[in-house]
Image (tube, grey):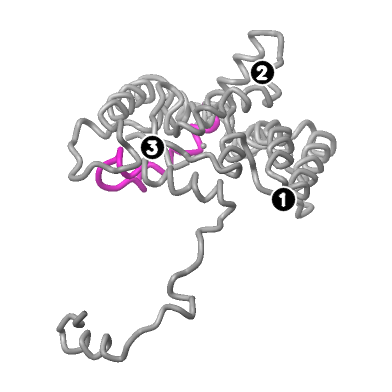
Amino acid sequence: MTYRLMNNGWAAGRGLAALLVLALLVGCAGTGNTQERNPVDPWEGFNRKVFVFNDALDRAVLKPVARGYRFVTPSPVQTGVGNFFSNLGEPRTVLNSLLQGKPGNAAVATGRFLINTTLGIGGLWDFATHMAITGMEEDFGQTLGVWGLDEGPYLVLPLFGPSTVRDTGGMPVDMATYPTTYVEDDKIRYGLTALRIIDTRAGFLDQEALIQGDRYSFIRDTWLQRRRFEVSDGDLGDDPFAGDDFDFDDADFEASESGDAPSD
């Protein structure tokens, strides 16, 4: 089974490993046909083929390695590895917070990076969270959304996984703002990238059972919902049931109780 509920190959928004993991976890949907074409997914035929390709890579390589990694690596070490890579994403959050007009979040991310890099021993310990210093992660795809650029069609990228046209366009900027991009030693840079991918994939092993129905559709819809939540900072709009303009007529309830539909 493969899975992707959440975050980038080029260090986009959720970082290089996250997008790679998204791709490698989004398979196993097969070639099942959907009942209706989703308007946000006009390239579904292509996307499903890439989805299956990514799954083949996951089954053959990434998932077995992730299982082995989790089996031999103590939980505290895994936590430290995750903290380390999360800390490297803070500079990206600082830049994009400023571009989005969120100086407060930029200050929080700066503080987290300085604290975790020093007191947290290079980011292995998330000391800032223990100090209740937390903020929101930001990437350039989110920045483009805040600037008003439409997300565009859903797109499954080979190796990189779930994305949109907007997020794909933001990848180069996110790559340029991730520190490992500037590690000159190829062995170290590739080693860090591989470790991040494996550690992230291991974190999803227990979540695959959450997928229900058509896996492709489930992952697409869940990913898009989460991504929109990130871009809007959790603002899902006004509750139509909470407004004063939304009124029920007594006849509506009477009709409902009698089993008849209300008349227009």
Instruction: Tell me the kind of residue under disc 2.
Output: Thr
**Residue 143 to residue 48: above or below:** below
Which x, y percent locates residue 22? 45, 32
Q: Which residue is mark 2?
A: 181
The secondary structure that most of the magenta stretch takes on is: helix
Q: Does 205 lie within the magenta span?
A: yes
The residue lying at 32 percent from left, 87 percent from top is 249
Q: Does 126 lie within the magenta span?
A: no
Instruction: Tell me the kind of residue under disc 3.
Output: Tyr
Disc sitting over residue 101 in the figure: none
SS for tag 3? loop
The CA span between labels 2 and 1 is 25 Å
Q: Which residue is mark 3?
A: 3
The residue lying at 73 percent from left, 47 percent from top is 102
**Residue 244 to residue 151: above or below:** below
Disc sitting over residue 134 in the figure: 1
The CA span between labels 3 and 2 is 27 Å
Instruction: Tell me the kind of residue under disc 1.
Output: Thr
Say whether disc 2 or disc 1 marks the residue closer to the N-terminus: 1
Magenta span: 198-219
